[in-house]
Structures are given as C-alpha cells and as structure tokens.
Image: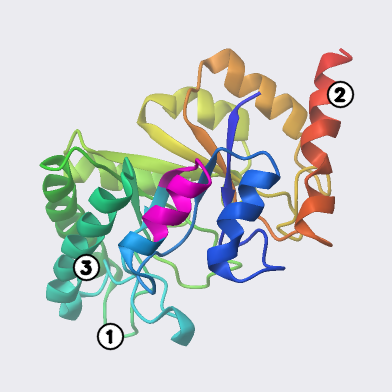
Amino acid sequence: MPKFAANLTMLFNEVPFLDRFEAAARAGFNAVEFLFPYPFAAAELAERLETNKLRLVLHNLPAGNWEAGERGIACLPDRVAEFRDGVGRAIEYAKALRVPQLNCLVGIPTKDVTPERARSTIVENLRFAAAALQKEGIKLLVEPCNSYDIPGFALNRSSEGLDVIRDVASDNLYLQYDIYHMQRMEGELAATLQKHLPRIAHIQLADNPGRNEPGTGEINYAFLFDWLDRLGYSGYVGCEYKPRTTTLEGLSWVREIAGARSAR
C-alpha cells in the first residue's frame, strides 16, 4: 500500500483546524498536508506537528483571495509582484515546517487576459518560483484541476501541466497528480501514472462522483494502489476528499481495500 497523508483542510472537520493534527495522529496517520498555513504562526503549526509526531508533506503557495473564489494568481499578469512575494512567504513557512515540496495552483484568468498571455505568465512565474525554491532545497509542484469543479482554471489536464513543465525547463518543477481531477478530465489513470511517474512528485485522491472517500464511486482504488506499488512510487498519497459522514467512519476504506488486496 502507498503511504497516506491526511489532508487537514478536507478531513477531520469535526474539530477546529489546530486540533486536526492530534485527530489525524490518533487515526493512525504519520503525515499530513493542507492547503495553506498562512492564517497561523509557523511556530504554532510546528509545535502541533512535533507534539503529534507528524510530518508535513505539502502545502500550497499563496493563492490569492480564496474566500472570494480565487484559485491562484500565477496566471495573472498584473499580479506578478504579489506572486513573487508569495513565493518568499511560502519559503519561510516551508523552512520552518520542514516541508519538502510546495504546490502551485495557477488560478483562473480574468476575462481581459488572453489564454496566450495567461500561459506565458504561468511559465515565467513558475520559472521564478522553481529557481527560488531550488536554492532552499524545496521542490515546486504544479497541479492541473478539473474544469467542472473549477470552471476557467488555466490547467485542466495532465498533458497541459507537463507542457508547462517542459517550457519552464527547470529540473525543480514537478507534477502534482490528483486522481480525482484527472478522472473527471481524462481517465487513463494507470497509463498516465506509468508514463509520467518520473515527473510526478505527489499524488492526491478522492473518488468520483462526489469527491468522497475511495470505495464510494467508480475508481478502482485497490487496483491503483497495487499499480503504484508495482511502479515503485515512493511518495505520499494525499487524502484530499470530503468524507460522506464522519472522517473516522470514512476511513474504513483503508481496511476494506487492504483486505481486498490481501484476499487476491
């Protein structure tokens, strides 16, 4: 089985955010991820991680005004300075929290920005971020997201993310492959993982439809976990899903899929 990290933005919402670290540890996780650390002091987050013997494997670069619907600013030509400031802020947190990799959500271009201009801005911003993070020994990731959940998002398919990686031409830029997003956009999960695994630094999961836990939808996660083992994937898989009921009840998928695999 792959190594799993609890996404504390999505899981354990039964308790306040800072209490989710203990909840994740009690549920058996030794690693976590979340969208953003910035509302909290880095020292406070570091204490929660250390107290609960958890490793933080991922968080995102600042992504603009999330509450207002922004999903990143890397595609916006008039906010390049803000993006670069955000890279510096993310590095400060990553170093304090010992995070090995940061993800960039590129965002939704405004109506006055052409697709060509949005893409060139993404490439230049990622080139800057990849170089800045490389100096600190931190990987940069970029994540395609499905256009159903996030209409207008600038990168929707794994091929689009890989094309951007090619154009940035940095050995410090990788793909974050979200199984749920890519199932909605393109399918071909196993073939894509096999073909592009060297450029995939992190994987996330949820089932489809509903973005709930594995076993609730159409994705054959028992097969995919076997497949990742056979491919030799050694990174974490982030559990970025919405529990159908409570988080703890939903975690039964781990035992059920593990049992199904061992019964073969």
Q: Position of residue 50 (x, y in %)?
A: 43, 46
Q: Which mark is residue 133?
A: none
Query: Is residue 184 shown to the viewer in this render?
Result: no
User: Does residue 117 appear left or right of residue 11 in this picture?
Assistant: left
Asked if residue 194 lies in the magenta stretch, the reply is: no
Crowdedness of circle 1 by 10 Å Cα count: few (<14), some, many (20+)?
few
Q: Distance between the residues labelled 1 and 2?
A: 51 Å
In the rendered image, which quarter contains the C terminus?
top right
18 or 259: which is nearer to us? 18
Task: Say whether disc 1 or disc 3 marks the residue closer to the N-terminus.
Answer: 3
Q: Which residue is drawn at 20% across and 61% down?
A: 87
**Against 224, is 184 above or below?**
below
Residue ID for mark 1: 112
Q: How far apart are marks 1 and 3 (CA)?
A: 23 Å
Task: Say whether disc 1 or disc 2 marks the residue closer to the N-terminus.
Answer: 1
**Against 234, is 38 above or below?**
below
Q: Residue 86 carries which label?
A: 3
Amino acid type at mark 1: Asp
Residue ID for mark 2: 260
Query: What is the span of residues highlighted in magenta in the rendered image?
Result: 45-57
Q: Where is residue 96 in the image (x, y as percent from the top left)?
A: 26, 52
In the rendered image, which quarter contains the N terminus?
top right
**Against 111, is 232 above or below?**
above
What element does badge 1 sit on? loop
User: Does residue 123 appear left or right of residue 255 in this picture?
Assistant: left
Amino acid type at mark 2: Ala
Tags 3 and 2 touching, CB below 8 Å: no
